[in-house]
Image: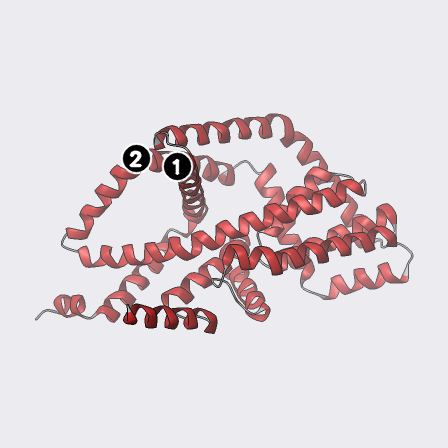
Amino acid sequence: MSWLEKLKENNTARRVLVFILIGVVLYLLRSMIDLILLTFIFAFLVTRLENVILKRVRIPRKLIVIVLYTLVALFLYVAIVHFLPILIDQISQLVDSLVKIYNNPPDNAIAKWFVGFLKESNIEKYLQTGVDFIIVSLSGIGSVGLSFFLALILSLFFSLEKERVTSFTGQFLTSKVGFIFKEAAFFGKKFVGTFGVVLEAQLMIALVNTIITTIALYLMDFPQLLSLSIMVFVLGLIPVAGVIISCVPLVLIAYSVGGLQDVFYILLTVVIVHAIETYILNPKLMSSKTNLPVFYTFIVLIFSETFFGVWGLIVGIPVFVFLLDILDVRNAEDKEKRTIFGRKKKVD
């Protein structure tokens, strides 16, 4: 019996080998990681929207796809033509004001202590990373803009020809190296079931947090409201830490605008947003998939940012949850549910 036949019969070895092979391929394609992730995100979100719409309205699926992408194109046109120049100007003013406050804090013991604390901590690093990501995404219409455009086109073609793509891809399962594609399909289903769902939940949480924070900032007459809202949304994509990191520039601006009173209101808003995220949105949207201790959350964010840069802050937790699912690591609550379900199934 050849080594290939032995490998086909050994499920664990085969699965590990394919997993390593996928990791090597992704590493070789690391320069295209923006395109790969954006294409997956767009295709996943469009598929989810399709399913939601089809449950309520009976219309052709391709028509839904065309309408969705037409709305996206109109939104991008309005955003680029009307809002992008305003946003770039606001970001420049915001960064300038933050740098001035940071380098020359007000003559106040609390403000000086707070700025000193920031200089000694790692929060400055993550804040700078978030600001750089916003500036590059909005003003650096180079590789990021090209990846964004290509991802939209690829996800559009995938959504329009989903049945044909699925049928054609299925032919690889019966090829001479079908065992590799079967394992790849297994990892693909796991990936969609964990990474996709968790990332979708992060987007929803970031959107809700941004709406609440923007309303509070509007009521307090904050300047550069549009750029601050974008910043809160982008940082909100970072689980747990994003809300805390976004608090830093908001507190500095609040103190320069309205003094300690506005600082109190901002901190109260952040506490409310964090409470809503922790006790309402996370349990409802993510269930037991990301029931991670805060310690693990920060460790994953630190390592993922170190190895993968800004993308690591956003996709680090979903990737970690995907790995936990692959290894069948489950919390006690989930194990209890599975045990109960298994017993019921046996009785039936």
- Asked if residue 157 lies left or right of residue 4, the reply is right
**Earlier residue among tags 1 and 2:** 1
* Residue at horizontal 81 percent and vertical 43 percent from the top: 220
Instruction: Indicate the amino acid at tag 1.
Output: Leu
Mark 1 vs mark 2, foreground winner is 1
Which x, y percent locates residue 251?
78, 53
Instruction: Indicate the amino acid at tag 2.
Output: Glu
- Asked if residue 170 lies left or right of residue 48, the reply is left
Assign the N terminus to one quadrant of the image.
bottom left
Neighbour tally class for label 2: few under 14, some 14-19, many 20 plus, Cα within 10 Å: few
Which x, y percent locates residue 12?
26, 70
Q: Is 260 or 301 nearer to us in this picture?
A: 260
Say what secondary structure mark 1 lies in: helix
**Is there any visible trace of residue 323 in the rendered image?**
yes
* Residue at horizontal 36 percent and vertical 68 percent from the top: 341
Say what secondary structure mark 2 lies in: loop
**Is there any visible trace of residue 222 in the rendered image?**
no
- According to the picture, the residue beneath numbered tag 1 turns out to be 54
- According to the picture, the residue beneath numbered tag 2 turns out to be 161
Which x, y percent locates residue 202?
54, 52
Compared to 294, does 188 lie above or below?
above
Q: CA distance from mark 1 to mark 2?
A: 17 Å
Compared to 335, does 90 lie above or below?
above
Q: How is the image coloured?
A: secondary structure
Which x, y percent locates residue 103?
81, 54
Assign the C terminus to one quadrant of the image.
bottom left
* Residue at horizontal 77 percent and vertical 52 percent from the top: 266
In the displayed image of the protein, which residue is found farthest to the right? Answer: 107
Image-quadrant location for residue 68: top left
- Asked if residue 232 lies left or right of residue 340, the reply is right
